[in-house]
Image (cartoon, rainbow, N blue to C red):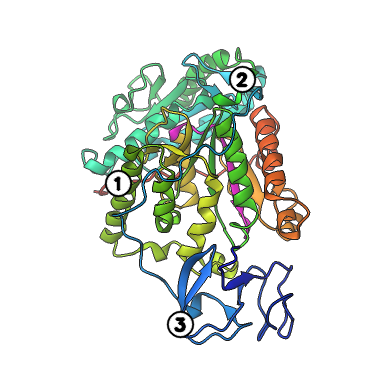
C-alpha cells in the first residue's frame, strides 16, 4: 500500500501455497490465506510492522521474509494520545466543484429531501412493539395498496422507554435519537407515535408536535381490535398526505449519504473503502453531505482527522468525542482492541490499528466540516463526522437520526445487514464475495484489486449508482424486503 511498508497482502482468491515466489519479493515460507499479510523482509522480534505507512503493530517473534503475519504474531501498539495533534494542516478541498448533477427526490416542507416516501410508526416504549407489529402488517395489507405513491410502512421499534433512568445525563442520547429518527426526510415530516401511557418516555419528550398519537391505555380503547383500529385510522390520514408527494429533480447538494463498513477484511482499505471515499468526495464537491462514523475504527487515526478539520473548533470537537468514548470504554473495563471480530481477523485484519487505517479512507480527502454527538441531527453540509459506536446496527440507527437518507455499506466477509428506513447499497470488497452473494451485493469493488478498474473509476461508478438509488432504483435488500431492527445507543443506567 506504500513504498515504506514491510508487509503486503495476498490478493489471490483462496490464498497462496507455501513455496510460492512473490514477484520481486521473497518465497512464501507457509500457506498465506487471501487478504492476509506476508513479510517482505526479515523482521526481528519487536520490529515495527508497517502497512499504509503506519505502524500497525510490533513483531511478537522473529518473522523471516515470506512469513505469514497475523494477529497472533503482532503486539498491538499503544493508542495515540489526544494532545499535540496536527490541526487544520490538510484541509484543502478534494477537488473543484461538481456542478449540474441531480437526483429525483422527495422535497419536504422544511427544505430537506428524501430518497424514499415512507410512513414511520414510532414508539415510546418497547411494550407496544407487538401491537405495532400487528398494526403495521395490516396497514401494509389493507391500506397501502390504496396509496400507490407511498413506498412502504416502517415500524421504528426499540427496547428503550421504561425501566431506565430517564433523567440520567446519558439518557439524552437515546431520547434525541428517537426524536431525530422520526424527523428523517424519508418520512416526509409526518410520523405516527404509538404510546402505552404509563412509560417514563412520555410522548412530549420527543418534541414532535405534528405527529399523530395513539395511546394504548386510553380508556376509549376497549380491547385489542380497538387499538389496532385507532392506529390504522391515524395511519390512513398520514398515508393520504404522503401519497401526494412526487419525485422531482433535486441538486446533489440536497443528498445526505451515510457511509459505513461491516464484516471488514484486509481488502476494505484497498478496494471498496478508497473508492467509496472518492465517491464521497464527489458528493461533497457537489455541495452534498456525507457522514462517516465508528469511533473505535477511527480512534487510531485521530491525527489524520484533526489535520483535515476545517476549523480548530471542529478539531476540538473530534478530540472531545474520542475522549468521551475512551471514558465510556474504560467504564466497561475494555479498550479499543475489543472492536475487531473473529471475521475481521479471518479476513486478514490483525488488529484495530490496521482496521482503522482501512476504515478512515471511505471518508475521502475532503475537509471535515462538522462533528455530531451521538443522536444529534446534522445542520450543516459537507463531510461530517457523526460519532457512533462501530456496531453496524447502532451506527446505522444513529446515522439515520443524523439525517442520512441513503447509506453505502462496504463489506469483505459479507453481511445481509440493511435498514428499511433508507436504502442501503452493499459494496463487496472482493469479486469472489460479489459472485457468491450475487443477489445481495449491489456493487463489486474487486476489480480494483485485479487492476481492471482504478480507484477513481470505481468511485465514479459508485457515485452514479448512489444517485440512481437515491432516485428510486431498488437495492437488492429492497427487492428482498429485508431489514434489520433499529438499535439505540443507551449508555445510561437501566433500572
Residue 404 image point, x, y percent: 51, 34
State which tag comes first along the sequence, 2 or 1: 2
User: Can the viewer see residue 442?
Assistant: no
Quadrant position of residue 285: top right
Identify the residue position indicated by label 2 in the image.
250
How far apart marks 2 and 1 lie (CA) works out to 35 Å
How far apart marks 3 and 1 lie (CA) works out to 33 Å
State which tag comes first along the sequence, 3 or 1: 3
User: Can the viewer see residue 233?
Assistant: yes
Identify the residue position indicated by label 1 in the image.
320
Quadrant position of residue 266: bottom right
How far apart marks 3 and 2 lie (CA) works out to 55 Å
- As helix, strand or loop, the secondary structure at mark 1 comes to helix
Nearer the observer, 74 or 210: 74
Magenta residues, as a range? 402-414
Identify the residue position indicated by label 3 in the image.
60
Asked if the magenta segment contains residue 412, the reply would be: yes
Q: Residue at x 46, y 16 (%)?
A: 110
Q: How many marks?
A: 3
- As helix, strand or loop, the secondary structure at mark 3 comes to loop
Nearer the observer, 31 or 228: 31
State which tag comes first along the sequence, 3 or 2: 3
Q: Residues within 10 Å of mark 2 (few under 14, many from 20)?
A: some
Q: Residue at x 36, y 41 (%)?
A: 374
Q: Residues within 10 Å of mark 3 (few under 14, many from 20)?
A: some
Q: Residue at x 48, y 58 (%)?
A: 356
Nearer the observer, 103 or 433: 103
Q: Mark 3 or mark 2: which is in front? A: 3
Residue 106 image point, x, y percent: 59, 20
Q: Residue at x 40, y 55 (%)?
A: 299
Amino acid at each position: 500500500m506504500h513504498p515504506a511498508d514491510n508487509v503486503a497482502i495476498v490478493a489471490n482468491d483462496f490464498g497462496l501455497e507455501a513455496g510460492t515466489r512473490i514477484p520481486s519479493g521473497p518465497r512464501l515460507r507457509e500457506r498465506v490465506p487471501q487478504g492476509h499479510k506476508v513479510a517482505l523482509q526479515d523482521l526481528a522480534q519487536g520490529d515495527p510492522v508497517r502497512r499504509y505507512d503506519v505502524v500497525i503493530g510490533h513483531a511478537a517473534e522473529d518473522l523471516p521474509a515470506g512469513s505469514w503475519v497475523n494477529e497472533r504474531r503482532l503486539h498491538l501498539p499503544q493508542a495515540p494520545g489526544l494532545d499535540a495533534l496536527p490541526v487544520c494542516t490538510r484541509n484543502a478541498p478534494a477537488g473543484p466543484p461538481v456542478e449540474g448533477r441531480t437526483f429525483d427526490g422527495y422535497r419536504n416542507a422544511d427544505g430537506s429531501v428524501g430518497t424514499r416516501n415512507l410512513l414511520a410508526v414510532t414508539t415510546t416504549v418497547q411494550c407496544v412493539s407487538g401491537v405495532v407489529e400487528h398494526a403495521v402488517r395490516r396497514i401494509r395489507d389493507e391500506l397501502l395498496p390504496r396509496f400507490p405513491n407511498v413506498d412502504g410502512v416502517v415500524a421504528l421499534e426499540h427496547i428503550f422507554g421504561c425501566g431506565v433512568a430517564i433523567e440520567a445525563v446519558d439518557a439524552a442520547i437515546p431520547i434525541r435519537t428517537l426524536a431525530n429518527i422520526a424527523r428523517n426526510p424519508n418520512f416526509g415530516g409526518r410520523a405516527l407515535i404509538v404510546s402505552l401511557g404509563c412509560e417514563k418516555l412520555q410522548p412530549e419528550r420527543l418534541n414532535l408536535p405534528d405527529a399523530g398519537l395513539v395511546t394504548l391505555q386510553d380508556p376509549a380503547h376497549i380491547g385489542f381490535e380497538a387499538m389496532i383500529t385507532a392506529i390504522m385510522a391515524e395511519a390512513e390520514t398520514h398515508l393520504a398526505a404522503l401519497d401526494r408527494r412526487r419525485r422531482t429533480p433535486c441538486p446533489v447538494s440536497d443528498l445526505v449519504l451515510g457511509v459505513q463498513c461491516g464484516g471488514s477484511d484486509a481488502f476494505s482499505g484497498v478496494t471498496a473503502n478508497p473508492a467509496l471515499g472518492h465517491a464521497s468526495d464527489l458528493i461533497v464537491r457537489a455541495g452534498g453531505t456525507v457522514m462517516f462514523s465508528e469511533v473505535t475504527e477511527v480512534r487510531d487515526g485521530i491525527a489524520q482527522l484533526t489535520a483535515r478539520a476545517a476549523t480548530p473548533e471542529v478539531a476540538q470537537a473530534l478530540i472531545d468525542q474520542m475522549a468521551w468514548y475512551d471514558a465510556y470504554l474504560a467504564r466497561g473495563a475494555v479498550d479499543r482492541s475489543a472492536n475487531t471480530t473473529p471475521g475481521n481477523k479471518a479476513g486478514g485484519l490483525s488488529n484495530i490499528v490496521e482496521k482503522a487505517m482501512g476504515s478512515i479512507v471511505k471518508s475521502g480527502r475532503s475537509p471535515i466540516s462538522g462533528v455530531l454527538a451521538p443522536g444529534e441531527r446534522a445542520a450543516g453540509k459537507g463531510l461530517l463526522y457523526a460519532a457512533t459506536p462501530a456496531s453496524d446496527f447502532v451506527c446505522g440507527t444513529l446515522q439515520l437520526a443524523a439525517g442520512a437518507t441513503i447509506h453505502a455499506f462496504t463489506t469483505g466477509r459479507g453481511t445481509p445487514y440493511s435498514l428499511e428506513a433508507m436504502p442501503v447499497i452493499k459494496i463487496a470488497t472482493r469479486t469472489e464475495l460479489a459472485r457468491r452473494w450475487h443477489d445481495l451485493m449491489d456493487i463489486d469493488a474487486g476489480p480494483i484489486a485485479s487492476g481492471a478498474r482504478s480507484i477513481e473509476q470505481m468511485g465514479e461508478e459508485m457515485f452514479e449508482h448512489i444517485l440512481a438509488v437515491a432516485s428510486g432504483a431498488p437495492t437488492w435488500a429492497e427487492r428482498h424486503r429485508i431489514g434489520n431492527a433499529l438499535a439505540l445507543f443507551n449508555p445510561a443506567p437501566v433500572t
